[in-house]
Image (cartoon, rainbow, N blue to C red):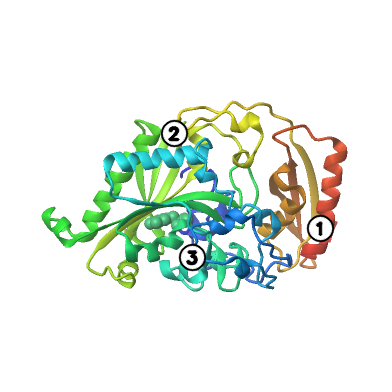
Amino acid sequence: MATSLANTTFFSKTCSLFIHTNSLKRFAFRVPFSSTSTSTSPLPLKKKWRPPAASALELGGVKMAKDDIVRDDPTNNVPDTIFTKLGMQLHKRNQHPIGILKNAIYEYFDSNYPNKFNKFDDLCPIVSVKQNFDDVLVPADHVSRSYNDTYYVDSQTVLRCHTSAHQAELLKEHNHFLVTGDVYRRDSIDSTHYPVFHQMEGVSIFYPDEWGAAGLDATEYAAKDLKRCLEGLARHLFGAVEMRWVDTYFPFTNPSYELEIFFKENWLEVLGCGVTEQEILKRSGKSNNVAWAFGLGLERLAMVLFDIPDIRLFWSSDERFTSQFLQGQLGIKFKPFSKYPPCYKDMSFWINESFTENNLCEVVRGVAGDLVEEVRLIDNFTNEKGMTSHCYRIAYRSMECSLTDEEINELQWNVREQVQSKLNVVLR
Ligand code: DAH
């Protein structure tokens, strides 16, 4: 199995494959139909919805006017920590690893398919439930639609959890396109997962004369072209690497694949892709065509390509991080400027039936922000009365300075207090 590294694709795979790995939760999204335990009720965190920085409102002008997003809706589960990330657009910074990687991928498409792909990188991340899920055929009971997994602005509006949210609409106007943007997912905390990350989506359609001339069936033709294109992209980014294709599941493609590369002794999942479901094309007025599509997670690739050890670093404004990268230079290896020791704090509590790890992580991040490196379940038991206890180990570590005992104790006290009051659990 490929290394689980940094937020990437979801929706694929069957659960059983991952059930014994510590990354099970990561792949909850990959179950074709809802099955894992996720609460569908909104978080008990009711935050006032505040307008983002002015720039965020100019995001492609796609959706909402400012007044539309100033709201205090009970179905809103977007905390301030996430809200403030809207409009940051790391993928548009040419000297930032995410922007450098985006540009390197553009370069591949520009040189191999001159003037073919339309590029979008400022579509608004606030999209409708229809765009995010229905338009790409995500089943009504799919776990990714839950409040536990997705940020809802209101019951009909979400922070996109994948760039596939734009596929259907763009297909109406364009035949070949790339969409880059920030995507948002409620998740647990460790060095490769962050609730905001970046994806690039690619879509390309074909006409009957193309597969006719090749003497192939439409689907075969698209799948072959897709594989050739993406193998070329992987070589462009990673050089001569060993690759393999793994069959998988996505609601929007059939057949569906993942591309893995053998990198530093591990099979690394690079992207998800497949031949677009005909229903999506039909609804976009392209029923005579066939198409391929892919989606890749930029942080995951950037961590490997630039040797970046912790996903929080992408958000750092510390000059010791930001000054290490240069426009157009994919090969630069990040030199850690210092590594302060982590400090671990354990907390145990009796959970209730609405408890989820994603909710816990959000509360912890709400208090400690990017000082929290990992939240890990280290003990779990149910007593004879049927009460279940969880013990979590929280790793605090600043990437920029050392933290005093006093600071950490204060954080931990606040975390305990907030966990108790917001999640209604009983501390032990
Ligand atoms: N949207 C998927 C995810 O976030 C990635 C993906 C897979 C995109 C297959 C695609 C695709 O366009 O065809 O996990």
Side of 236 where 394 appears, left or right: right
- Residue 373, picture quadrant: top right
Q: Is residue 238 above or below residue 24?
A: above
Nearest-to-viewer mark from 1 and 2: 1
Residue 267 shows in this picture: yes
Residue highlighted by disc 2:
263
Q: Which mark is residue 83?
A: none
Q: Amino acid at mark 3?
A: Asn
Q: Amino acid at mark 1?
A: Gln
Taking depth in this image into account, of 217 and 174 the one nearest to the observer is: 174
Q: Is label 2 within 8 A of ligand 1 (CB to nearest ligand atom)? A: no
Q: Name the residue: 45% across, 71% down.
A: 134
Label 3 sits on a secondary structure element that is helix
Q: Which mark is residue 418?
A: 1
- State how many labels appear: 3
Q: Percent from the top left, x then y, of residue 372?
A: 72, 44
For marks 1 and 2, the one nearer the N-term is 2
Q: Percent from the top left, x then y, of residue 200?
A: 44, 50
Nearest-to-viewer mark from 3 and 1: 3
For marks 3 and 1, the one nearer the N-term is 3
Q: Quadrant of ligand 1?
A: bottom left
Q: Is label 1 within 8 A of ligand 1 (CB to nearest ligand atom)? A: no
Side of 423 where 21 appears, left or right: left
Q: In which quadrant will I find the C terminus? A: bottom right
Q: Residues within 10 Å of mark 2 (few under 14, many from 20)?
A: some
- Residue 74, picture quadrant: bottom right
